[in-house]
Amino acid sequence: MAGQSLLFIFSDAAKDDSQKHLVDEVRDIISHVEGFKHVEIIKRRKNLGLANSIIDGVSRLTEEFGNVIVFEDDLVSSVHTLKYFNDALKRYENEEKLMHIGAYMYPLQGNNLPQTFFYRAATSWGWATWDRAWKNFQPDIDKLISQFDAQMRHEFSIEGTMNFWKQIEEFKSGKNNSWAIRWYASIFLKGGLTLNPSQSLINNIGHDGTGIHSGVNDMYNVKINPSPITYFPDKLEENPEAYFAIKSFLKTRKGNLLERGLRFLKEKFR
C-alpha cells in the first residue's frame, strides 16, 4: 500500500548552529527514501518546533487532500498499519462524531476486547484524521480552558488516572508546547470519539531520553500486533470495557514505590 501513497516529509530547521549538522544528517537520510508513489520533502527554513510543524503540516495536507495520516520519526509500525488507516478513513469518512484514528494502544492486559473500539482520548503516536474533524482544532489554550468545569476535567483525565489536565496547565504556563493535548481537548469538547486498536500497531522507540516530551521509561513499550485489522465497530459510542481496561492500565502504569523511585533516579541522572 505504500507504493500507492503520497509521502510528505516535513523537516524542521535547526534551533541553532550547534544542531545544524544533525538536521543535515537527517535530510541526507530522507533524501533517499523510496517505496512510495511520490515523495515530497518540505525543508523548513526556520525552526518551527514540533507543535507548530505538526499543526502546519496537518492543516496543509487535510485542506489539500481531505485527510492525512501522520507519523513522527520515532515510531516503528506494523506492516498492516497503513491499510488500517486507509480502511478506517474510508469507512468513517462521513461520521462527524469520529474525529481521530489512532494506531498506538497501551499494553492492556487480560482483556477480550474487539480488534478496534471507540474511546474518548486521542493518541499521537501514529494517527489520522479528516479535514472535517481537523477544522475543529482549537490551538488557543485559554479558549479551551474556559469551556471546562470540574466534572469535565475529571472525565477528560480518565477519572484522574492520567495527567491530561496537568498537560493543559503546563501548556498554559509554558512548560510544554504540545499540539496533542490541545487536539484531544478539541475532540473532547466537541463530544467526539477516536478509533483505536486493542493491540497496538505502533511502538514508540523515543523513550530513551531523546524525545521532545518523553523521558526514559519502558512503561509504554508494546508488542506490535502482527495481524491485519479486519473488524471495525458500527455503533459510534465509547466502548465501556475498553475504557475500563485503559483506566486500569493508567492507574497502575507507574508501578510500586520502588519502581517509581528507580525511574526517577534514571531520569535525574541520565
Image (cartoon, helix red, strand yellow):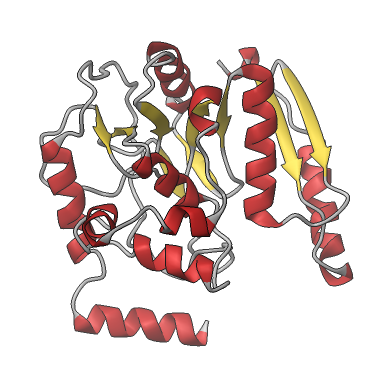
Front residue of this view, candidates 62 and 241: 62
* Left or right relative to 96: residue 67: right
* Left or right relative to 48: residue 222: left
Give the residue displayed 34% in from the left and 30% down from the top: 226
Report the label total: 0
In percent of width and height, residue 228 lies at 34, 21
Q: Quadrant of the N terminus?
A: top right
In percent of width and height, residue 270 lies at 52, 81
Tell me the quarter of the picture where residue 37 sits.
top right
Is 196 located above or below residue 76 in the figure? above
Is 68 located above or below residue 25 in the figure? above
Residue 205: in sight, yes or no?
A: no
Tell me the quarter of the picture where residue 3 sits.
top right
Front residue of this view, candidates 109 and 120: 120
Front residue of this view, candidates 6 and 31: 6
Tell me the quarter of the picture where residue 60 sits.
top right
In percent of width and height, residue 263 lies at 36, 78
Give the residue displayed 81% in from the left and 37% down from the top: 42
Give the residue displayed 28% in from the left and 58% down from the top: 149
Residue 57: in sight, yes or no?
A: yes
In percent of width and height, residue 236 lies at 24, 23
